[in-house]
Image: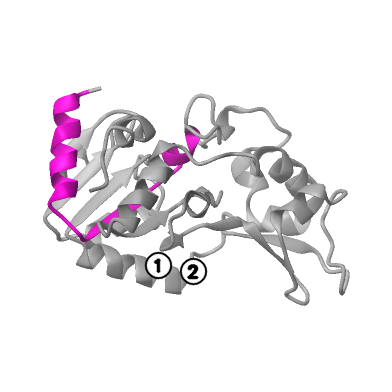
């Protein structure tokens, strides 16, 4: 790890009380949750259908049994625990440094770590609703259901509150995310290759003082960043103090 860059990150954090964090799958891989695009990610596993097809809206409607077989097996990691990145972000918020976490992840680990202002661009596996009457069900109910989870009130099919392929992002969450980024002094982006749109386009709204990119691999926006750290975000944040 480049400790000189870690020291630069600490100085940037020390000098701001208006930081926004935008994170992707790489934030949760250190908690054992697979991402989609790494060599051991979901895209490289073998199923009857490609993962992109399985977690699409039309597939959910057409083949809910197949959808839930994959979803329960690969996307419900209810035993996963927050790692150093999640915990440090919660500390920075508590210390008055961090205004919001904007995440592409659906695992709820930021909230489990103690973060309060979390904007979930792609929803959460922790929330599930009947498609017919809107009754709420938690993730344990879905996980333990035999096959396709059904509503106990009306018998309708229960759907996770996650944004599937072919579905649009929540406009209110996008608007709030844009507002936080537009008004931020420092934007730290971690664990994302910045290739998934429209979420990746949020960076274009940042006009603050310092842009920091932390990712294991290069991103398309590295050239425009004030600080680039090519390393695992949990390992980097474990070196940072919230003060």
Image quadrant where residue 241 sits: top left
Residue 170 numbered tag:
2
Q: Residues within 10 Å of mark 2 (few under 14, many from 20)?
A: few
Q: Is residue 191 left or right of residue 139?
A: left
Say which of 91 and 27 sits in front: 91
How many numbered badges does the structure rendering display?
A: 2
Q: What residue lies at 19% left-to-right and 48% top-to-bottom?
A: 13
Residue at horizontal 25%, vertical 22%?
1
Above or below residue 166? Residue 240 is above
Q: Residue furthest bottom?
A: 133
Residue 56, position as x, y percentages in the image: 63, 53
| 18 is higher (above) or lower (below) than 219 | below
Instruction: Specify whether residue 11 is painted magenta.
Output: yes
Q: Secondary structure at mark 1?
A: helix
Contact check, label 2 and label 1, Cβ < 8 Å: yes
For residue 177, side relative to residue 226 (left or right): right
Q: Does residue 58 show up magenta in the picture? A: no
**Is residue 180 among what the camera can see?**
yes
Q: Which mark is residue 109?
A: none
Q: Which residue is mark 1?
A: 174
What's the distance in space between the residues labelled 2 and 1, CA to CA? Answer: 6 Å
User: Where is residue 204 drawn, in percent x and y?
Assistant: 23, 58
Q: Nearer the viewer, residue 44 or 71?
A: 71
As helix, strand or loop, the secondary structure at mark 2 comes to loop
Residue at horizontal 59 percent and vertical 44 percent from the top = 52
Residue range of the region highlighted in magenta in the rendering:
2-29
What percent of the width, then of the height, locates residue 240?
26, 38
């Amino acid at each position: 790890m480049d400790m000189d860059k870690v020291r630069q990150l600490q100085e940037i954090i020390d000098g701001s009380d208006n930081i926004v964090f935008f994170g992707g799958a790489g934030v949760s891989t250190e908690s054992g949750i697979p991402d989609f695009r790494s060599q051991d990610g979901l895209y490289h596993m073998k199923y009857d259908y490609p993962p992109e097809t399985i977690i699409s809206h039309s597939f959910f409607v057409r083949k809910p049994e197949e959808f839930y077989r994959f979803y329960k097996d690969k996307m419900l990691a209810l035993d996963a625990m927050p790692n150093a990145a999640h915990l440090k972000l919660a500390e920075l918020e508590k210390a008055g440094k961090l205004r919001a976490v904007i995440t592409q992840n659906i695992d709820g680990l930021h909230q489990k770590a103690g973060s309060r202002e979390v904007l979930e661009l792609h929803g959460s596996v922790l929330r599930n609703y009947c498609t017919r009457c809107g009754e709420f069900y938690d993730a344990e109910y879905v996980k333990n259901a035999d096959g396709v989870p059904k509503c106990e009130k009306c018998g309708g099919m229960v759907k996770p509150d996650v944004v599937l392929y072919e579905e649009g992002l929540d406009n209110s969450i996008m608007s709030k995310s844009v507002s936080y980024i537009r008004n931020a002094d420092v934007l730290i982006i971690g664990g994302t290759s910045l290739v998934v749109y429209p979420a990746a386009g949020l960076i274009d709204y940042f006009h603050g003082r310092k842009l920091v990119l932390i990712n294991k691999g290069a991103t398309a926006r590295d050239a425009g960043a004030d600080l680039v750290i090519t390393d695992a975000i949990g390992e980097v944040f474990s070196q940072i103090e919230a003060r």
